[in-house]
């Protein structure tokens, strides 16, 4: 269902109803492991994929940054500007 490099690959799924009443498959929430990282201050116009490309030479690893900061929605991680976040090592 998900690509091997996806944060959701291999996770258990459940069947739930969406707001229209249709059944959809959803990934169960998972506990996030403690992830060591280096503190970075969010700057205006930062993007997770660009930070991941700079850090890991792989833009698709943006979700590692989100996981290291316990964000459910990766898009909220870079708000507000000036916020400290952790970039995981390796």
Image (cartoon, helix red, strand yellow):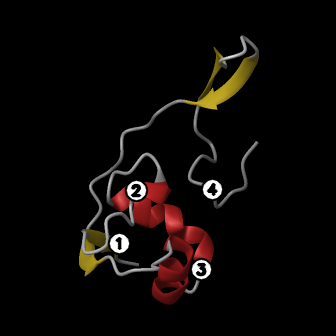
Q: Residue at x 46, y 64 (%)?
A: 64
- Circle nearer the N terminus (4, 2): 4
User: Would you name the residue on which mark 1 appears?
Assistant: 88
Badge 1, how many Cα within 10 Å: few under 14, some, many 20+? some
**Looking at the image, do the residues carrying marks 4 and 1 touch, with CB atoms under 8 Å apart?**
no
Mark 3 vs 1, N-terminal side: 3
Outermost residue on the top side: it is: 21
Front one among 2 and 62: 62
Question: Which quarter of the rendered picture does the C terminus lie within?
Answer: bottom left
Graded by Cα atoms within 10 Å as few (under 14), some (14 to 19) or many (20 or more), the crowding at tag 3 reads few
Q: How far apart, in angstroms, are the residues tagged by discs 4 and 3?
A: 13 Å
Whole-Å distance between the Cαs marked 2 and 1? 9 Å
Q: Report the front residue among 16 and 57.
A: 16
Task: Say if 18 sits above or below 53 in the image.
Answer: above
Mark before the other along the chain sequence, 3 or 2:
3
Pick the quarter of the image with the N terminus: top right
Image height of 46 relative to 70, above or below: below
The picture places residue 84, in percent across and down from the top left corner, at 23, 71
- Pointer 4 or 1: first along the chain: 4
Residues tagged 4 and 2 counted as in contact (Cβ below 8 A): no
Judging from the image, what secondary structure is the residue with disc 4 in? Answer: loop
Mark 4 lies on residue: 6
First reached walking from the N terminus: tag 2 or tag 1: 2
> CB atoms at circles 2 and 1 under 8 Å apart?
yes
Characterize the local packing of mark 4: few (<14), some (14-19) or many (20 or more) Cα atoms within 10 angstroms.
few
- Which one is earlier in the sequence, the residue at label 4 or at label 3? 4
Where is mark 3, residue-wise?
58
Residue lying at 62% horizontally and 43% vertically, measured from the top left:
10
Q: CA distance from mark 4 to mark 2?
A: 12 Å
Residue 67 marker: 2
Residue 60, compared with residue 15, is above or below; it is below
């Amino acid at each position: 269902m998900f690509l091997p490099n996806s944060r959701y690959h291999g996770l258990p799924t459940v069947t739930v109803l969406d707001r229209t009443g249709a059944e959809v498959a959803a990934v169960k929430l998972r506990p996030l492991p403690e992830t060591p990282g280096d503190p970075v201050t969010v700057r205006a116009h930062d993007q997770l994929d660009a930070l991941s490309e700079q850090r890991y030479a792989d833009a698709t690893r943006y979700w590692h940054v989100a996981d290291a900061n316990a964000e459910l929605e990766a898009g909220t991680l870079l708000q507000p500007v000036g916020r400290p976040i952790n970039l995981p090592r390796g």
